[in-house]
Amino acid sequence: MKLLEAVGLSQTYGWEMGWFTRNAKRVQAVNNLSLTLEEGENLGLVGESGCGKSTLARLLLGLAKPSSGRVLYRSTDFTDWSLSEMRMIRSKMQMVFQNSLASFNPRFTVEQIIGEPLRNYGVRNAEIRRAKVAETLELVGLEGRHIHRYPHELSGGQQQRVGIARAIALRPELIVCDEPFSSLDVTLRKQMMDLLQELKLELGLSYVFITHDLSVVSRFCDSVAVMYHGEIVEKQSGANIMQQADHPYTRTLLASVPVQDPRLRKNF
Ligand SMILES: Nc1ncnc2c1ncn2[C@@H]1O[C@H](COP(=O)(O)OP(=O)(O)OP(=O)(O)O)[C@@H](O)[C@H]1O
């Protein structure tokens, strides 16, 4: 079943006309893009900086309105919905950011950070909320003793775990990860990818995984969409993308992937 669908999405920034924007340049960040995410799918979205990945993520999550096109969640078109109408769908779609620390309120403890979405969605009782936070912390592999800490008292890996915990607090169906582990070292990155896979099995999640890194998504994702200048120029299965890239831009991306085994590049 289709979980999320984008149909002919476009997003334009800036204006060509008007005296106060005479020098403003129009940017076509997303250009007539269509995309489907099946329930349970891990979709990788790769492309160079500025190709429109984050803009597309915001449109898919309903955090911005597209200039044109539609977005559907479980076949329900929410493109023109108001913020209050979006509320239920929002709880089903969450985001994990590149820099979790920057997305936290520094005055909040771990308990408050993870508890905030719960409170916003009606879990008013502090005891019940604390129990749900503790359960969620356990799911992301953080010990309960961290619950009263502030984000700056945690390591980078622990901060990302709290970011994931906040994202799953409402038990969503979809998580969009925007370069979530690019600041972590290779070992931690692997641990985090494993954690996301475990959570997928435990909670039945689907992922959209935004990155510059083809080698990561080829291992983690069922399918990989390659973006270039606001368009999807290629979509392949994760398993095939390293060997069977068709589009010249994808080959350029692959050429920049550091690989230990030269046979992986035999087709290029
Ligand atoms: N709010 C905005 N106003 C004007 N232009 C914007 C805005 N947000 C993004 N852009 C422009 O739209 C284009 C796509 O940006 P976007 O952040 O979506 O790309 P990206 O692929 O996510 O880049 P990165 O990988 O560096 O995060 C860029 O040219 C960017 O400068």
Image (spheres, rainbow, N blue to C red):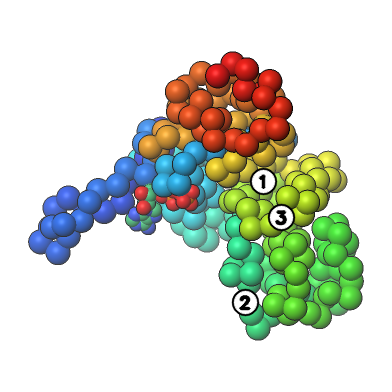
Residue 59's disc is none
Q: Would residue 188 appear left or right of 135 to someone viewing this image?
A: left
The reply to whether the C-beta atoms of the residues labelled 2 and 1 are less than 8 Å apart is no
Task: Give amino acid for label 1.
Answer: Leu
Quarter of the rendering containing residue 155: bottom right
Query: Which residue is label 1 attached to?
Result: 174
Image coords of residue 164 (percent x, y): 72, 58
Q: Is residue 4 left or right of residue 157?
A: left
Q: Find the distance from the CA under tag 1 to the CA under tag 3.
A: 25 Å
The disc labelled 2 sits on which kind of residue? Asn
Image spot of residue 208 (x, y percent): 62, 42
**Which label's residue is closer to the chain start, 2 or 1?**
2
Q: Mark 3 Cα within 10 Å, few/some/many (few <14, many 20+)?
A: few
Report the residue at 62% width, 36% height from top. Answer: 258
Question: Three-letter amino acid code at disc 3?
Answer: Asp
- At mark 2, the secondary structure is loop
| Residue 111 horizontal/vertical position (percent) | 77, 75
Residue tagged 2? 105
Q: Name which residue lies at 67% across and 46% down.
A: 174
Kindly tell me whether mark 1's CB lies below 8 Å from ligand 1: no
In the rendered view of the protein, which quadrant contains the N terminus? top right
